[in-house]
């Protein structure tokens, strides 16, 4: 706690040095919340859960390396007419993406770095937890022409990126009207 207090005082001093003229009178309340840090990243193949598989909205590339993120992005850029889950469709495009300086399996926190290297792509990453889809990463680049949604599957210790081919179909079941749904990337 002493280190946190020193850090806050240091930040306040830096703010005042820039001529803000503000003074801190007192801190009325301070809440500290902690959680175990487990950086999420993709890895090799994980089978698609049956509930998601039955929706036919996700392409799960059957890879045995740590490049599931790359294969999923390439599956969006170069859709296969048949058996889109097979890796051989995308191998020939492997060098098409700029991955300079990135390490694989790619952590969700590094998706922003990937977007900076590939200026025409915007990528969102979702997770499936407790029968609901949760945004893990939402792109800040709203004006980019190619929008890709990925679903990060997890079995506890292992994670695997898959391509969301049809978001409306993936979230179907939230309402029973049977119509196509349009999803806000931020919700």
Image: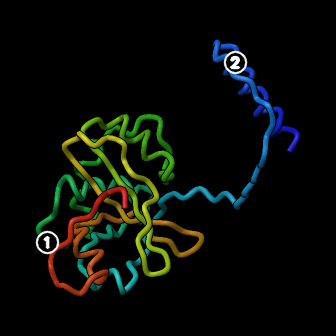
Residue 140 to residue 43: above or below: above
Q: Residue at x 48, y 53 (%)?
A: 108
Q: Which residue is mark 1?
A: 82
Task: Give residue 25's position: percent from left, percent from top.
Answer: 79, 31
Q: Quadrant of the N terminus?
A: top right
Q: Quadrant of residue 2?
A: top right
Q: What sort of colour scheme is used for the picture?
A: rainbow
Q: Which residue is mark 2?
A: 16
Instruction: Give the distance between the C-alpha atoms of the residues marked 2 and 1, in whole angstroms.
Output: 62 Å
* Residue in the foreground of this view, choosing between 60 and 19: 19
Mark 2 vs mark 1, foreground winner is: 2
Most distant residue in the right direction:
2
Residue 159 to residue 105: above or below: below
Q: Quadrant of the C terminus?
A: bottom left
Q: Quadrant of residue 182?
A: bottom left
Q: Quadrant of residue 75?
A: bottom left
Task: Give residue 66's position: percent from left, percent from top.
Answer: 46, 57
Under circle 1, the secondary element is loop
Task: Give residue 95's position: percent from left, percent from top.
Answer: 29, 42
Q: Residue at x 28, y 66 (%)?
A: 164
The mark that comes first in sequence, 2 or 1, is 2
In this picture, residue 54 sits left or right of residue 36: left
Q: Residue at x 28, y 43 (%)?
A: 142
Under circle 2, the secondary element is helix
* Residue in the foreground of this view, choosing between 62 and 122: 122
Task: Give residue 94's position: percent from left, percent from top.
Answer: 29, 48
In this picture, residue 89 sits left or right of residue 99: left
């Amino acid at each position: 706690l002493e280190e946190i207090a020193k850090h806050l005082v240091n930040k306040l001093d830096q703010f005042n040095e820039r001529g803000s003229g503000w003074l801190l009178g007192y801190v009325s309340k301070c809440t500290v919340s902690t959680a175990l840090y487990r950086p999420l990243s993709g890895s090799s193949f994980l089978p698609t859960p049956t509930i998601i598989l039955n929706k036919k909205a996700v392409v799960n590339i059957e890879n045995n390396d740590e490049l599931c993120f790359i294969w999923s992005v390439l599956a969006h850029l170069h859709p296969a007419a048949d058996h889109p889950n097979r890796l051989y469709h995308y191998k020939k495009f492997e060098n098409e993406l700029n991955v300079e300086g990135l390490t694989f399996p790619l952590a969700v926190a590094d998706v922003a770095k990937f977007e900076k290297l590939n200026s025409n792509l915007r990528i969102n990453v979702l997770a499936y937890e407790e029968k609901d889809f949760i945004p893990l990463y939402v792109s800040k680049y709203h004006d980019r022409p190619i929008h890709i949604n990925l679903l990060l599957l997890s079995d506890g210790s292992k994670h695997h990126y898959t391509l969301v081919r049809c978001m409306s179909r993936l979230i179907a079941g939230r309402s029973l009207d049977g119509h196509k749904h349009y999803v806000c990337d931020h919700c």
